Amino acid sequence: MVLLHVLFEHAAGYALFAVKEVEEIGMLLPQVEESVLNIGKFNGMVSLAAFFPFKSAQAALENMNAVSEGVVHADLKLFLETNLPLSGKKKAVLGVSDAKIGAALQEEFTISIQTGGVVAEITRGVRLHFHSLVKGLTGQAASKAQLGLGHSYSRAKVKFNVNRVDNMIIQSIALLDQLDKDINTFSMRVREWYGYHFPELIKIVSDNSMYCRLAQLIGNRKELSEESLESLEEVVMDSAKAQAILDASRSSMGMDISPIDLINIERFSSRVVSLAEYRLELQEYLRSKMSQVAPNLAALIGEVVGARLISHAGSLTNLAKYPASTVQILGAEKALFRALKTRGNTPKYGLIFHSTFIGRAAAKNKGRISRYLANKCTIASRIDCFSEVPTSVFGDKLREQVEERLSFYESGELPRKNVDVMKEAVKEATDVAAEIKRKLEKKEKKRKKREKKLQETNGDAEVENQEADTTIEKKKKKKQAAEEMEVQAEETAVAENGAQETPGKKKKKRKAEAEDLEAQAEATDNGTEDTPAKKKKKRLSEAADAEPAAETVASEKKKKKKKQTAE
């Protein structure tokens, strides 16, 4: 009897399912196929032995990464050790959907692993009815877990160093090739168009971008004079050519051109010139990206050829996986298959033909040097792909080796051994990598210091603001207290002054009362009547004047009583 357990990896966790005991696993296949779609029948054949839920999304991602790479994670190992019956009379078989993880588990536990056949069918059924087989897990929760893990897994796989992206190289080299074609066709159009007016210029100036600049500068050839000779020299960078253009313009056989046609030619030539300038900028950008992504390949074979190899392979990783024989004929697939079909000679080189080495080699040595160069290209691409700190040390050393091999084919001078060269390269590369790491650490320290300073300054500013707020509040409180004290002092002074009023003050009050009476009399004489607001004001003023008068009368009475008592 065989005891079959099936391991199922889900986004929610690991599940171990026990399949009913049979003599041979192959006998299960027709029964499982019939019962996969029916949950009732499937439950009769398969039962959940154990379930290990993941603690967090991060743990789920780590486990899935390990499973996809064929590595046994610590969680999976613990789960199988606790739940899988490894010892007993019955022969235990573990069913796994992926052969890679199956091989790793077989090494770890020394048990028989089953993949494919009935295991694949059971896995299909488990995947279909998983939320029904595990208690407490709903279909919605299972789909959410799958979606979340899928997003995080894809994000982790796509995550890369921004400075080492080979996609930008692929796009820029494709754009560079397209720009070369476009600039060539556009400049030929400018030559043909402007050639009607000034046909002699085509023979004098062969460069396309220079011709477009001259067409833009000259315009109407009849307006060209000795004064414009300096500007022509600036464009052509040759005084003899500039003089030849001036002489040709005076005795040209071209037809006259209208101003509107001339404007259109100048516009189009300016567009072509701007495209040529952008092409130079793009080439510089490609050079900088290659020095960041594949410095060794760029140092060995050149930026443009290296970028073409990466583009043709699809990525730097794919290029690193290719053997040297594939890299040698990369780009010459049509010629290879045609040669295989017709049983002719296979091509000796593909894209690497554009490197300077093959052009410099003799005809009989072209195949040999291309094979040697392809070998060195594969080494350089692998170093670039898998090195942590990108340096061009290995690329320079490999280039020296190719140069030595080229001179060996020509003169017979023996090149250095590969072992010695690589030892030197490793020593230099470690020194350079250490230097780069030290610089990066310094930058990181400086950045942290800046952040600390910013935090401190922000904290100091907050403290100062708080102190300023507290001082303002204190000042406000002091002002309020002072105002209250002043009010109290005024009230006490008024109370004291009310009891002791001088004769001078009495006179002043009498005068004021007399003046008020005169004003009232004048108002009645003039026939003007006071408004209700004015009347109110007058009543208030009269009441205010009456109060001190009453106080004075009371004080005088008190004084008289005191005098009488004294007498």
Image (cartoon, rainbow, N blue to C red):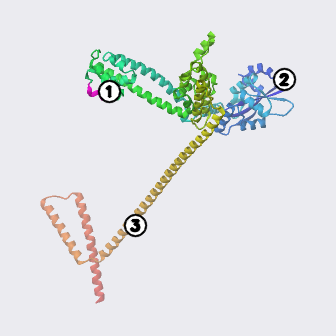
Quarter of the figure that contains the C terminus: bottom left
Image quadrant of residue 47? top right
Instruction: Determine the main secondary structure of the stretch shown in magenta.
Output: helix
Q: Is residue 399 visible?
A: yes
Image quadrant of residue 435? top right
Q: Residue furthest top?
A: 342
- Tell me the crowding category of disc 2: few under 14, some 14 to 19, or many 20 or more residues within 10 angstroms, Cα based: few
Q: Is residue 12 visible?
A: no
Residue type at tag 3: Ala
Q: Report the residue marked by disc 3.
A: 481
**Nearer-the-camera pick, 200 or 335:** 200
| Above/below status of 317 relative to 504 | above
Nearer to us of marks 1 and 3 is 1
How far separated are the C-alphas under marks 1 and 2? 96 Å
Does the segment drawn in magenta span residue 431? no
> Of marks 1 and 2, which one's residue comes earlier in the chain?
2
> Of marks 3 and 2, which one's residue comes earlier in the chain?
2
Q: Report the residue marked by disc 1.
A: 232
